[in-house]
Amino acid sequence: MEATAKVTYVRIAPRKVQIVLDLIRNKPCDQAMAILKHTPKAACEPLEKLLKSAMANAENKDMDVSSLYVAECFVGQGPTLKRIRPRAQGRAYRINKKTSHITLVLREAE
């Protein structure tokens, strides 16, 4: 049995989220939560909320919360917000603000 949680349109670049997801993949949920609490990355805050949500979803499906582990976690690119930055001599530079769609899947360990 598995429990899933998704968060979409998170205002952080997917490559920054991927670094943190690699740290928690295939770890027990309590260990993954400790890693997220003590890692100084901007992506940890939305991932911590997502992990709590997935654990609550698992609890509602009558799964054993103490034996859960992060089975799958991946991030996809969302839409990019395009902004303009004024530069010298009337020019304009484009600023791309990337967004992410993050998915987390928890399973019970056998």
Image (spheres, rainbow, N blue to C red):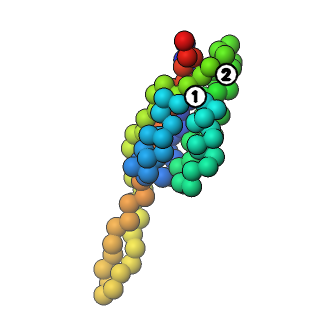
Q: Which mark is residue 53?
A: none
Which residue is located at x 33 percent, y 72 percent?
93
Please give left or right for residue 25 compared with residue 55 in the image.
Answer: left
Q: Secondary structure at mark 2?
A: helix
- Asked if the residues shown at circle 1 and circle 2 are in contact, with their CB atoms under 8 angstroms apart, the answer is no
Number of other residues with Cα within 10 Å of mark 1, as a class: few under 14, some 14 to 19, many 20 or more: some
Q: Residue under circle 2?
A: 66
Q: Position of residue 49 (x, y in %)?
A: 63, 40
Q: Residue at x 57, y 50 (%)?
A: 39
Left or right, 76 with respect to 103, comes to: left
**78 or 16, nearer to the observer:** 16
Q: In the drawing, what numbered circle is on residue 28?
A: 1
Does residue 57 sit above or below 34 in this rendering? above
Using a 10 Å C-alpha cutoff, classify the residue at mark 2 as few (fewer than 14 neighbours), some (14 to 19) or many (20 or more): few
Badge 1 amino acid: Pro
* Dot 1 or dot 2, earlier in sequence: 1
Q: Could you tell me which secondary element the residue under label 1 belongs to?
A: loop
Query: Is residue 2 visible to the viewer in this orientation of the structure?
Result: yes
- Left or right position of 58 against 86: right
Q: Position of residue 102 (x, y in %)?
A: 48, 38
Q: Quadrant of residue 84?
A: bottom left
Q: Where, by quadrant of the figure, is residue 96 drawn? A: bottom left
* Residue 91 screen position, x and y as percent: 30, 80
Q: Is residue 45 visible?
A: no
- In whole angstroms, how far apart are the C-alphas of marks 1 and 2? 9 Å
**Horizontal relation, residue 1 to residue 82: left or right:** right
Q: Quadrant of the N terminus?
A: top right
Image quarter in which the C terminus is found: top right
Task: Say if 61 sits above or below 81 in the image.
Answer: above
